[in-house]
Image: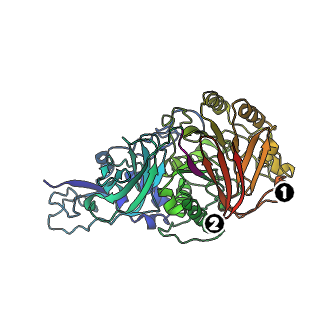
């Protein structure tokens, strides 16, 4: 008996062409085949904060999705040959003659590397984007180091027309697993991608992670599937990603401003979700193989399209695409919980607690530097996030405790406008709600407050707490002391590498190209 597969018209579309198409065509593809397209409520509504969490369960079953329109599908067998009982002609709805020729399916190609996300002690997620072909034809398989046989993951979820996603489970803690992405009809052939993923480490194990921030990657009309670059930001992120890979981190944390929408105005939202999707695809592509070898954890920045001063509908344009193309931990992934929108969360790894915060989406006032600067002390995490932060820190048992945020919940920089804009790092330790956060860090023995936003390397110790800014990984703007107020800083592009041991922590500032420009240790 022949296996049969439903192939959506949208999945047969060349997505490298779709990437450069009009927004109207992108909408048409969604409407034709993506009933799993999430929104902030999971039912077609839009909410900026609160409400029901988004539905990200892979969408409707494959046969239900295929039924979205008979004119948009055809039946082929597993080898790609037309079967005798194809029910309709896509153009006329007339019965198809068994002798009619049907073109073979488009070969599957990937956009960049798979995204490894939300690893736990027994599992990790994989998110793959295709530029061509049908993502339902992809398969994932996993094996432990030294094993000769592969274990097949379950069939992929299909949360969007160009995404296949898996949760690979039943694994052991603290283990570096190998995985492969293959095409179902050719599982014995060369894999489309081979990568690695580390599961959550237990206390007592040493490890390293990388932090980069402020890559400022703009969307392209058409995202290449190769590694060609265009301009400073793309050149820089590609090189920083290569430098990170050389250090073999367990995972990567991006401190926000992954994307950049300057083409639409200063800190204004993109006009349509298409542009956020294209931004995340371009960002993923430039992380290259690093993305497929170390799990990725995002922090929301002011250029990522989710600022609380936008309308609920405007926030949703970017939030939905992040949840699809850059998923993170859900509230149930780790015992520490977090936001239903995956924009704040916490997890432990080895002897360290990692707490990721979101200052952008819960501050509803505008901060636009010269045009509408706002004030420095009205930044907020919101009541729910601040309460969650205190509970998370109060329950912590890890030796090392780190916070990650795009910028302080307040500002104290080199001039009034940049102060209101949230710049200044440790200089703002006692400003507005940051004073509350700082007091919590003191009370619950947080050692490092990692942040971004100011595009330089610097570190300042306030009441024994390091306020650490690891440069920028694409931003062309290197702000001087007259802007930031910093007395000591480095304008190099690069990232931070952090080595965590049970008895010590070492933080290295690494300039683009691999040179260490500054280090400090905690003992």
Out of 156 and 49, give the one closest to the viewer: 156
Report the disc number at residue 179.
Answer: none
- The answer to whether any part of residue 375 appears in the image is no
Question: In this rendering, is residue 145 above or below 14?
Answer: above
Residue farthest left in this picture: 1
Q: Position of residue 11 (x, y in %)?
A: 36, 59
Q: Residue at x 71, y 56 (%)?
A: 266
> In the figure, is residue 136 to the left or right of 462?
left
Question: What is the secondary structure assignment of the residue under circle 2?
Answer: helix
Q: How is the image coloured?
A: rainbow
Q: Residue at x 32, y 46 (%)?
A: 154
Q: Residue at x 62, y 27 (%)?
A: 391
- The answer to whether any part of residue 500 appears in the image is yes
Out of 144 and 24, give the one closest to the viewer: 144
Q: Residue at x 54, y 50 (%)?
A: 251
Range of magenta residues = 204-209
Report the disc number at residue 236.
Answer: 2
> In the figure, is residue 18 to the left or right of 406?
left
Q: Quadrant of residue 188?
A: bottom left
Q: Position of residue 171 (x, y in %)?
A: 38, 42
Magenta region includes residue 226:
no
Q: Position of residue 328 (x, y in %)?
A: 52, 45
Out of 416 and 356, give the one closest to the viewer: 356
Bin the neighbour count of mark 1 within 10 Å (Cα to Cα): few under 14, some 14-19, many 20 and up.
Answer: some
Out of 80 and 124, give the one closest to the viewer: 124
Quickly name the residue at label 1.
481
> In the figure, is residue 295 to the left or right of 380?
left
Question: In this rendering, is residue 75 above or below 367?
Answer: below
Please state, as top left, top right, bottom left or bottom right, where the C terminus lies in the image.
Answer: top right
Tell whether label 1 touches label 2 (CB within 8 Å). Answer: no
Q: Position of residue 423 (x, y in %)?
A: 78, 49
> In the figure, is residue 48 to the left or right of 64?
right
């Amino acid at each position: 008996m022949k296996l049969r597969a439903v192939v959506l018209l949208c999945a047969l579309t060349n997505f490298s062409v779709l990437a450069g198409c009009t927004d109207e065509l992108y909408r048409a593809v969604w409407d034709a085949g993506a009933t799993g397209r999430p929104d902030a409520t999971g039912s077609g509504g839009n909410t900026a904060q609160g409400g029901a969490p988004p539905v990200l369960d892979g969408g409707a079953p494959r046969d239900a999705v295929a039924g979205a329109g008979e004119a948009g599908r055809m039946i082929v067998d597993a080898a790609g040959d037309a079967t005798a009982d194809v029910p309709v002609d896509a153009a006329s709805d007339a019965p198809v003659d068994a002798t009619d020729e049907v073109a073979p399916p488009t070969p599957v190609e990937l956009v960049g590397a798979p995204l490894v996300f939300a690893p736990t002690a027994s599992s990790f997620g994989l998110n793959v984007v295709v530029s061509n072909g049908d993502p339902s034809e992809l398969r994932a398989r996993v094996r432990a180091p030294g094993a000769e046989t592969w274990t097949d993951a379950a069939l992929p979820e299909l949360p969007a027309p160009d995404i296949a996603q898996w949760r690979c489970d039943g694994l052991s803690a603290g283990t570096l697993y190998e995985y492969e992405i293959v095409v179902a009809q050719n599982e014995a052939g060369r894999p489309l991608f081979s990568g690695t993923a580390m599961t959550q480490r237990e206390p007592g194990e040493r490890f390293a992670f990388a932090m980069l921030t402020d890559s400022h990657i703009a969307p392209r009309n058409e995202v290449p599937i190769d590694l060609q670059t265009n301009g400073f930001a793309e050149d820089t992120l590609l090189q920083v990603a290569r430098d990170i890979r050389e250090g073999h981190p367990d995972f990567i944390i991006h401190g926000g401003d992954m994307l950049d929408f300057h083409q639409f105005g200063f800190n204004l939202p993109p006009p349509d979700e298409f542009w956020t999707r294209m931004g995340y695809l371009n960002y993923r592509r430039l992380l290259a193989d690093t993305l497929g070898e170390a799990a990725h954890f995002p922090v929301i920045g002011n250029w990522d399209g989710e600022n609380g001063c936008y309308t609920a509908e405007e926030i949703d344009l970017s939030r939905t695409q992040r949840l699809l193309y850059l998923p993170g931990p859900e509230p149930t992934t780790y015992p520490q919980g977090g936001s239903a929108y995956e924009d704040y969360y916490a997890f432990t790894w080895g002897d360290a607690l990692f707490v990721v915060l979101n200052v952008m989406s819960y501050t509803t006032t505008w901060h636009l530097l010269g045009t509408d600067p706002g004030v420095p002390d009205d930044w907020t995490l919101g009541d729910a996030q601040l309460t969650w932060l205190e509970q998370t820190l109060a329950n912590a048992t890890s030796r090392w405790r780190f916070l990650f945020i795009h910028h302080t919940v307040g500002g104290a920089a080199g001039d009034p406008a940049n102060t209101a804009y949230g710049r200044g790092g440790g200089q703002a330790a006692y400003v507005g709600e940051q004073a509350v956060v700082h007091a919590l860090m003191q009370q619950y023995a947080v050692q490092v407050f990692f942040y971004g936003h100011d595009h330089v390397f610097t570190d300042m110790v306030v009441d024994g707490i390091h306020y650490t800014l690891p440069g920028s990984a694409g931003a062309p703007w290197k702000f001087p002391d007259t802007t930031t107020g910093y007395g000591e800083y480095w304008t190099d592009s690069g990232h931070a590498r952090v080595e965590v041991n049970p008895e010590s922590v070492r933080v290295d500032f690494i300039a683009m190209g691999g040179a260490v420009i500054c280090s400090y240790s905690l003992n």
